Image (cartoon, rainbow, N blue to C red):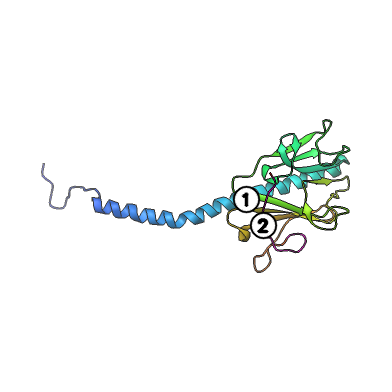
Amino acid sequence: MKLGPDRHQARGFTLMELLITVSVAAILMATAAPGFQSLIQQSKQESRVNELTGALYYARSEAIKRSSRISVCARSSNTSCGTNWDKGWIVFIDNGATPGVIDTSESVLKVASSLPSGFRVKNTAIVQGASEATQRSYVRFGPRGLSNWRGSGTFTFCDGRGTSAARAINVSMSGDVRHARADGSGIRYDTFGTALSCTTQSSDA
């Protein structure tokens, strides 16, 4: 059967058209990839910032509710504290004679896993009797909600994007927990009024 004058045989893409389409798609993907990767990093970072914030809120609330002492410490294993917050953290009842240490009689309440590769968190705090900011491996809340960070302290989160993307959690003298807010210039500050920085970011093994 012959085709009528207003009918045409369907034809596919030519090789040249296909190559052009693939080239344009590759250019668009290359352009969008960095921004997409940054969004993924931001999402991961904010998730862990919120997770630690929640752990600190929970520990303080439980300390008040139980009229007890509850600590959040850097995780070494799921049942022991360490010094490297990159490995996660543990919330536990801390009424023993050794603050910041999970004794055999003390119960673990929550455990958080390690941060994703390339993400770091450091903390600086002034504890009672200390004259300057130092690295702290735990925060201990008492029955009235006060913490052992009597001079306040900060957790700073960093990733490969550097200082501009840094986020922080500030713990006040009263034990209040808040996210560090950006000023009009987009700069965030720790609890001591110092601009956040990732240039000296380091973690203990």
Image position of 55 with respect to 183: above or below: above
Task: Name the dominant secondary structure of the magenta segment.
Answer: loop
Closer to the camera in the image, 115 or 43: 115
Check residue 195 for magenta coloring: yes
Residue type at the position of mark 2: Thr
Q: Residue at x 66, y 47 (%)?
A: 48
Image position of 146 with respect to 195: above or below: above
What is the span of residues highlighted in magenta in the rendered image?
190-204
Count up the numbered dots: 2
Q: Which residue is mark 2?
A: 200
Image position of 5 with respect to 89: above or below: below
Q: Position of residue 28 (x, y in %)?
A: 41, 56
Seen in the image, is 10 located left or right of residue 118? left
Q: Position of residue 177 (x, y in %)?
A: 77, 53
Residue type at the position of mark 1: Gln
Q: Which residue is mark 1?
A: 45
- Residue 177 seen by the camera: no
Closer to the camera in the image, 123 or 21: 123
Seen in the image, is 11 located left or right of residue 132? left
- Residue 196 seen by the camera: yes
Q: Position of residue 34 (x, y in %)?
A: 49, 55
